[in-house]
Amino acid sequence: MKVITIVGARPQFIKVAPVSLELRAKNIKNILVHTGQHYDMRMSDIFFKELNIPEPDYHLGVGSGSHGTQTGRMLQAIEVILMKEKPHWVLVYGDTNSTLAGALAAVKLRIPVVHIEAGLRSYNFNVPEEINRRLTDHMSRLLLCPTKQAVDNLDKEGFTNIIDNGELIDIKSIVKLHTVSDQPVTINVGDVMYDLLRKTDHIIDKNSIKILHEYKIEKGEYILATIHRAENTDYKEHLENIIRVLSFLEYRVIWTLHPRTKNRLEEFDLIKDISRTVNIQTINPVGYKDMISLQKNAKFVFTDSGGVQKEAYLLGVPCLTCRDETEWTETLESGWNHLIGIGASQLKKCFPFGTPRNINHKVYGDGSAAKRIIKILIEYA
């Protein structure tokens, strides 16, 4: 069996790590295609090294550009690779332009698509990721969902070939799976990011000592901030308010600057506003281990990243999310995550915080999502 995996952005490198490991363990030929959507070393190369992901077999070097330009370049290049390699499956992850381009190229060539992290919904069509994930779901043969809620979302949209009513599938029962329907198959396999967190937990504890010393911070005495979405960064007034809000908080702020955010801060001449604050320290993007260490030891996290929201929940760290909605509704229901609006416009409504309920890790599976995924690929091949 031959599998082609298509990635291009930082969140996908994290998700692909446990799946890549399981593919190698089963001696399944996996051809890795890196679109180059994220091309900065700190947003790309460091993750391959840290997470033991093999070097890409193809690096497309697409780089930045408008959504149409970027997706079109990817589509054209991926099609050539698929026609040459003729894989049994094409694996795509999440909701980026790389995801959409990979799925579209494959389905046009009648190669079955596997969407890992299928079924997530924000129900906000102004967000490009929502369009990408919905279109990808409707082009995929296997919809591998991270949660029961994701399965329920697909059920509402008319996907009927749902295994085990959307409950986390028992690994042992996968060999018995059979389907006669030509409908896409929807399965709750758990969350691959939870797999990686569990596997690296002992490393993160050791790394935390280093990271706290490096930035001269104490556990529970700082806020970790990370902002990158267009709705927050492409509008000067939103970035101004985020800076204002962070400067008013009574804690030191460690703000990891995504390249998009840094460019906008410079374009809007807001770097000087940050330099005038007494508590905000900006740093370059960091690798997986350092990022998880910074999250795990923070008082709370301030972000607009979907993955960071989920990681904060699993790490038991409160999160303030600069959005009006989230795909990870489980984090809201337990009180660990609070939506504070675009540009942090609704922050005051979130204070004071209540006491979050106990964390239910089981909503994201049992740490064996990658094993389930590979077993499903083998069974359905």
Image (cartoon, grey):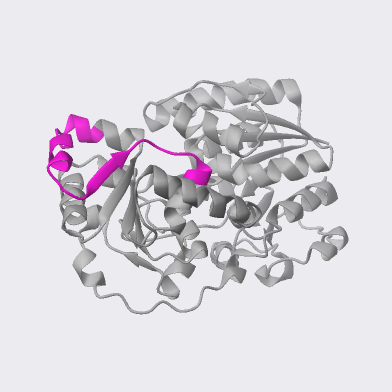
Residue 120: give x, y in percent of width and height. 51, 57
Expressed as whole percent of the image width and height from the top left, the position of residue 59 reads: 58, 22
Quadrant (top left, top right, bottom left, bottom right) of the N terminus: top right
Q: Residue 186, how many percent across, how many down?
A: 67, 59
What residue lies at 21% left-to-right and 61% top-to-bottom? Answer: 250
Span highlighted in magenta in the image:
264-290
Vertical position of residue 351 compared to residue 30: above or below: below
Query: Residue at point 20% right, 60% down?
Result: 249
- How many numbered marks does the figure carry? 0
Q: Which one is nearer the viewer's eye here, 98 or 140?
A: 98
Q: Is residue 121 visible?
A: no
Residue 298's quadrant in the figure?
A: bottom left
In the picture shown, does residue 345 fall above or below 70? below
- Seen in the picture, residue 160 relative to 203 is either above or below; the reply is below
Q: Which of 284 and 379 is in front in this view?
A: 284
For the C terminus, the image quarter is: top right
The foreground one among 218 and 20 is 218
Quarter assignment of residue 268:
top left
Q: Position of residue 245 (x, y in %)?
A: 18, 56
The verdict on residue 282 being magenta is yes
The residue positioned 40% from the left and 37% from the top of the image is 285
